[in-house]
Amino acid sequence: MSAAEPFGYYKDENGVKQPIPDQLKALEQAKFYMKSGCTMRAARDWLVMKTGREISTPGLLKAIRYDKNKKL
């Protein structure tokens, strides 16, 4: 996976972004943890452990914003 691909998505053979359901579900859980008082760093650590995909703390914030805009 390229670093340019948003967390929870990959590019298929045609270059179209496709969702990775397990990662998006884990991202939703991480957002819930943060709303419940968990720090962003702790949520990021949990997300990396859960999905095996590396993401930085700023990357987590970017993924949350991307996911929010995708839903609008």
Image: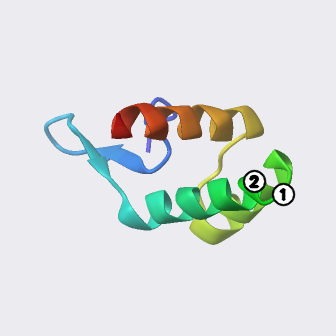
Amino acid at pointer 2: Met
Where residue 15 appears, as percent x and y from the top left, is 21, 34
Residue name at image x 37 percent, y 63 percent:
21
Classify residue 25 as left or right of residue 50.
left
Which residue occupies 84% across, 56% down?
37
Return the residue at label 1: 38
Q: Between 46 and 1, which is closer to the camera in this rendering? A: 46
Q: How crowded is mark 2: few (under 14 residues within 10 Å), some or many (20 or more)?
A: some
The location of residue 61, given as percent across then percent down, is: 66, 35
On residue 34, the disc is 2
Q: In this rendering, is residue 14 above or below 44?
A: above
Query: Label 1 crowding class (10 Å Cα cut-off): few <14, some 14-19, many 20+?
Result: some
Quadrant of the drawing holding the N terminus: top left
Mark 2 falls on what kind of element? helix
Proximity of marks 1 and 2: CB atoms separated by less than 8 Å: yes
Q: Quadrant of the C terminus?
A: top left
Q: Nearer the viewer, residue 53 or 7?
A: 7
Q: In this view, does 7 lie above or below 35?
A: above
Q: How is the image coloured?
A: rainbow
CA separation in Å, label 1 and label 2:
4 Å
Question: Horizontal and vertical percent for residue 71?
Answer: 36, 40
Rendered residue at 46%/29% (across/down): 4
Is 70 on the left-hand or right-hand side of 36?
Answer: left
Three-letter code for the amino acid on which mark 1 is drawn = Cys
Quarter-of-image position of residue 56? top right
